[in-house]
């Protein structure tokens, strides 16, 4: 997995995707440095605060455009969603460690395609589904 692909996956995680207060062991530490610029840009574009991100990490995902559009922004930055807010499941699954492939495929299959009133709402619905099915492996950058 190259650096850009690793970044793509962790933009997803917003799905990505995993509500724990610390990143899972399988997340390479360099991911955080690699996404820093896009994270800052997306936070600025959508008025997202670190406190909001921390709340999502603590299991409090709200349908608030500030956080849902931030998640969409990260996913879009890493080419994990298209212009209509649809997840590129093959790309996302290809970025995950082999040990998570089967479980992730099942979860993505249950959570996609995603509906919503706009791209941010679609990501909220996707994230809510993933969070419900896999709270132990979801976190947000």
Image: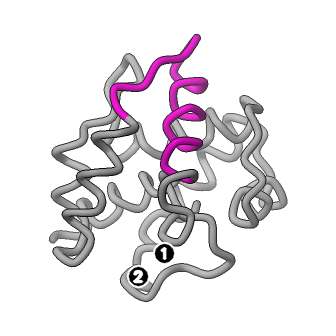
In the image, the segment drawn in magenta is: 112-131
The quarter of the displayed image where residue 20 is located: bottom right
Give how far across and how far down residue 91 sits, in percent.
19, 47
Residue 114 covered by magenta stretch: yes
Give how far across and how far down residue 3 sits, in percent.
25, 69
Render colour scheme: one colour
Q: Within 10 angstroms of label 1, few (less than 14), some, or many (20 or more) residues?
A: few
The quarter of the displayed image where residue 117 is located: top right
Quarter of the image for the N terminus: give it. bottom left
Quarter of the image for the C terminus: give it. bottom right
The quarter of the displayed image where residue 21 is located: bottom right
Q: Which residue is mark 1?
A: 33
Q: Is residue 71 above or below residue 102?
A: above
Q: Which residue is mark 2?
A: 30
Q: Are marks 1 and 2 in contact (CB under 8 Å)?
A: yes
Q: Residue at x 52, y 63 (%)?
A: 138
As rendered, which of 4 and 10 lies closer to the eye? 10
Give how far across and how far down residue 139 sits, in percent.
56, 65
Q: Residue at x 51, y 21 (%)?
A: 119
Q: Is residue 106 above or below residue 59?
A: above
Give how far across and how far down residue 101 sits, in percent.
20, 65
> Please, what is the dominant secondary structure of the magenta stretch?
helix
Q: Is residue 73 above or below residue 98?
A: above
As rendered, which of 39 and 124 lies closer to the eye? 124
Q: Secondary structure at mark 1?
A: helix
Q: Is residue 7 above or below residue 109?
A: below
């Amino acid at each position: 997995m190259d650096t850009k692909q690793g970044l793509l996956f962790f933009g997803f995680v917003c799905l990505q995707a995993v509500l724990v207060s610390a990143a899972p062991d399988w997340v390479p530490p360099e991911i955080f440095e690699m996404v820093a610029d896009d994270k800052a840009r997306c936070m600025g574009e959508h008025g997202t605060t670190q406190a909001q991100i921390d709340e999502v990490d603590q299991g409090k995902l709200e349908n608030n455009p500030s956080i849902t559009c931030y998640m969409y922004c990260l996913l879009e930055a890493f080419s994990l969603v298209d212009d209509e807010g649809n997840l590129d499941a093959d790309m996302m699954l290809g970025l995950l460690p082999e040990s998570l492939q089967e479980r992730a495929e099942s979860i993505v299959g249950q959570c996609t395609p995603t509906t919503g009133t706009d791209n941010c709402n679609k990501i909220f619905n996707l994230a809510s589904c993933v969070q419900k099915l896999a709270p132990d492996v979801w976190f947000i950058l």
